[in-house]
Image (cartoon, rainbow, N blue to C red):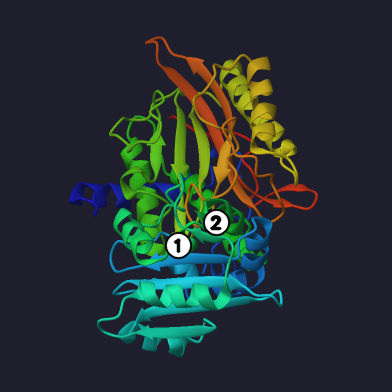
Amino acid sequence: MTSCRTCQVLWIILLVAMLLSACAGGGDPAGSDAATSDGAAEARFDFSGDPWLEIRAERIENLLPAAMDRHGIDAWLLVCRENNNDPLARHVGCENAGGTAAFLFFRTAEGGMYSVAASPRGEATSLAEKNMLSEVIAVERGQTVWSVVEDQFERFAPDVIAINTGSSPIADGLSHTQYAALTHALPVRWTLRFVSAEPLIRTWLSVKLPAEIDIMRRAAELTARWEVEAYAAAVPGVTTDRDIADFLEAKMAAAGVGDGWSPEQNPAVNSGKDRGHSHPTERVIEPGDFIQTDFGIRVHDMWVTDIQRFAYVLAPGETEPPARALAKWEAAKAGSRAAFNAMRPGATGADVDAAQRRVMEANGSLPVMWGTGHPVGYWAHDSGPGLSGRSTSQPLEAGMTFAFDGFHSWPLSDSTTKSISVEEMVVITDSGAEWLTPPQEDLILIRSK
């Protein structure tokens, strides 16, 4: 929630934005039509309704079988419960679990998929009415869900059974208590067939359907547009990093969209030295500052964006940044484009990271601790191959979506560093990477009086 002082600041910022929008310098990464307010443009950013149920059904029917086959998985078992649920509950339909429920997905001899939910009778009624599973089995009072799970294993006789354990928080949904109960209740001939579902989950989640990519494209366009508008409202010597964040938070509230990650650090606005993932402060922007805004929104309570835009604060009388400041920007952009050009089906995340680091070294950048990029979609740091030297061997493929940075870092006089990390979003196509929204080509310029 914003304070009264913040509310007053927001009114001032919004008024200033109207006055300054026509004269704010710099490139507009959202394009010349970004600030239009006609009905057609605004309708493009309507995220009402809930497309997830239809998309989820298509993902389970069309993407999950292939992912299971790729990793030799015959059955996938998820255990759901109330409050502290599995991170993938909403992806399979057990987000409304009360008592312990088991969702099972079996590959059939005919090459299809058969899904079974074992759920307490109350929730089982609702699950059956939704008609999203092949079969719903009601667990009667006094009966355990594990006996139903055992019956289904006897019925389908899977050789390899994936369960939600792994190093990724997204895949590690089975609690210690659930795992202990599961392994205690089932005969060892079944528990010996358990493997981690993490490779399966990574493959399944990392590819997005065309309908999802369209949603993410529109959300990315809106994210970048708002960042440009926030900079247009900034006044050197008056506006703080916190004010810029407040402007963007007001935009999210008015549009009814959520945060792409933790609200305390979204947006992360920083006009000073490197602070990593952090909250915005009361630092006042001044001439000579590079301003970094790392911002993401969540739409339909499912898909998120992760985009950074950079601005430079001009000194009084300046019409463009000094040559050294522009050179830093161009160096960061060159790293971004090298990474972009390296992203294609079959490439690894390490290939992409190495392409950018070669440019960084050639341009005299300090090394940075961060990888070049990461999957983005259901979470800001989604499941899939990371674009870093520590990435998995999973290759890039069409339909994957990423956020990635162009880095250039240099030392400051107090032994700290400042980095440009312009962050863009892309989707991988059959021929390479494709921007989800036009990338930032030029520094956004904030003029001083």
**Residue pushed farthest left?**
4
Report whether 241 appears left or right of 154: left
Q: Mark 1 or 2 closer to N-term?
A: 1
Q: Is residue 52 visible?
A: no
Which structural element holds mark 1?
Answer: loop
* Distance (Cα) linking label 1 and label 2: 9 Å
For residue 65, the mark is: none
Residue beneath the point at 56% across and 20% down? 325
**Residue 66 versus residue 15: which sits nearer the camera?**
66
| Callouts 1 and 2 close, C-beta under 8 Å | yes
Q: In which quarter of the image is residue 203?
A: bottom right
Q: Badge 1 local density, few (<14 within 10 Å), some, or many (20+)?
A: many
Q: Mark 2 points at which residue?
A: 201
Secondary structure beneath disc 2?
A: helix
Q: Position of residue 439 (x, y in %)?
A: 64, 43
Task: Give the residue at mark 1.
Answer: 88
